[in-house]
Image (cartoon, coloured by chain):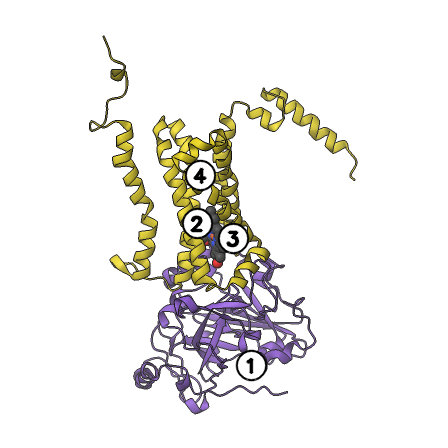
Amino acid sequence: MTVRIPRIAPSEITPPETYFNRRAFLAGALAASAGAALGRAGAAVVPAAAGAPLVYSYDAADSVGALVHAPGQDEKPNSWEQITHYNNYYEFGTSKSDPSEYAGQLQTRPWNIAVGGEAEVTGSFPLEKFLNPYALEERIYRFRCVEAWSMVIPWVGFPLAQLLKQFKPTSRAKYVAFETLYRPSQMPGQRVPILQWPYREGLRIDEAMNPLAFMVVGLYGRVLPNQNGAPLRLIVPWKYGFKSIKAIVRILFTETQPLTTWSQAAPNEYGFYANVNPHVPHPRWSQATERRIGAPLFHERQATLMFNGYAKEVAYLYKGMNLHTYF
Amino acid sequence: MTSPAAARPKPFLGLTVERRYRLIYKPVVFLASLMPLAWMACSLFGWLGFTPPVDVVKFLELRCGKTALNFIMLTLMVTPVRQLARLPNLLRLRRMLGLFAFFYATLHFTVYLLLDVDLDWHQVAADILKRPYITIGFTALVLLIPLALTSTNRMMRRLGRRWSRLHRLVYLIAVLGVWHFYWQEKIDVREPLVYAGLLLVLFGYRWVRSPNMWAVLAPGSTRPAAAVRRLARVAASSALRPPV
Ligand code: HEM
């Protein structure tokens, strides 16, 4: 089976004047940066403060711009301001503005990531070493929240499939599970038992191997801000946003389906799969449409697409499954 | 010889109670009641150093809904406050508070209609029929309409005792409003629970003050001991009854 990802030059999507000028600037920053240059062929992550320019090699010809254009939809990326000031990140509070207000206190260095379970390579790795093998690229993805709003976001990161290849899950590994940092001293929301902390998420291995599943370290060419899940988060663009776990500290390969936070909290409302699906409503609201944040005020609503518009790329994963049962 | 007027409290600023309310208190409360609207406008347009919210639509929708519920709570607080603080004339402000509840609820619905669902009547109909939290909110809004329409002096006079019976609907509206608030939350229901608690206190106050509070629990009994006995008897008989 092969999955073809449409290659779309970012120039089609992003306002070029604002974007490419900054890229030129970033290339200069790479030379000047004091941080260890890591990775292949100039690809690099600088262990810098959140929001600082992220230094990565960018080659439009080499990039996978996995944004599927859907006719009649406004697919301009949301602004930095919108993406960084409208967040669901209950570790910092349940209001959309809490993360941008309180995530600054989170210390993201030093940061360790533990990998365990059914894999040939396991252990605990400092972030810098953990990220070493990967070349960074940009992906402009739609982001659809289970609350029926959406954005378009230019992430920087590397495919989850590459990570899996590094750690070589064994044939017994059927799932990959992720865990968020548990540090109530810096994550005030964790002092309130709204959800069972730490936050947990997971994917089936074949979902994780899909080229669209993405590990993210940056946003708009900058180091990922804390409120967006720094230093390392997952993005699964065909699933509701809560699957895309933030501030990852643990990765576990398992034989059985891992527990996931939202399906634990309300099993009848949030499933393990959580695929974007306009035909399966949330028990309390419809998922048929969504409001695109930042769209013209009287025309924010648009139709929600099956698998968030990525059906061509991911539908094979769910062939023969009843998506009403496995929601 | 003392005139009857001398027994009354001294007029404040030389104004009678009626004029004080008409010229000072009511305009002040009216302007204060517009502050949530002013705040929304400042946020929306970035006036006075406010930053516009990222999600303008949700901001307006949630603010209006919350403000409507706040005014319903304020309306229900008038009776206990005027009794406990011995300020009987506070009653003169209640109609305005109730009408502001209706105003913000209408605004809430308007934002939903124009900005949230973009005037998609199919979605509105589907929401009202299929989404229980919206069914409940809609019911509350519909029930507010007759109360607003009968709030004039003329209607009060015309309806007489039926007026106060009609306006007891506000208790149901308050319950529906809090329920709607509770059901639209994704998971964090702390705030709606605070409102539910406040509502319980407000209802409890009225129950305790009602002349026949025990009769509410067990019809026919006027003293606590009798009510408890009757309740115990009912409970025992239903517990002993075999399940159907
Ligand atoms: C036709 C009538 C109504 C409709 C269609 C409606 C619809 C809505 C919607 C769509 C939300 C937002 C849910 C979300 O996205 O999280 C909401 C929230 C809310 N509504 Fe309503 N509503 C109605 C009537 C009312 C009434 C009459 C009240 C008050 C008495 C009310 C009070 C609230 C409150 C307090 C919230 C939550 C605000 C917050 O979370 O801060 N609604 N309503």
Q: Which of marks 2 and 1 is in front?
A: 2
Q: Which mark is residue B150?
A: 4
**Which residue is labeled 2 in the image?**
B105
Disc 3 from disc 4: Cα separation? 46 Å
Is residue B123 visible to the viewer in this orientation of the structure? Answer: yes
Q: Nearer the viewer, mark 3 or mark 4?
A: 4
**Which residue is labeled 1 in the image?**
A161
Question: Circles 3 and 4: CB distance less than 8 Å?
Answer: no
Question: SS for tag 3?
Answer: loop
Q: Do labels 3 and 1 share a chain?
A: yes
Residue lying at 68% horizontally and 73% vertically, measured from the top left:
A321
Q: Are marks 4 and 2 on the same chain?
A: yes
Residue B238: name its quadrant: top right
Disc 4 from disc 1: Cα separation? 66 Å
The image position of residue B33, as x and y in percent, is 33, 45
Residue A323: name its quadrant: bottom right
Point out the image quarter for the N terminus of chain A: bottom right
Q: Residue furthest left?
A: B13
Q: Is mark 2 within 8 Å of ligand 1?
A: yes
Q: Are marks 3 and 2 on the same chain?
A: no
Chain ID, mark 4 = B
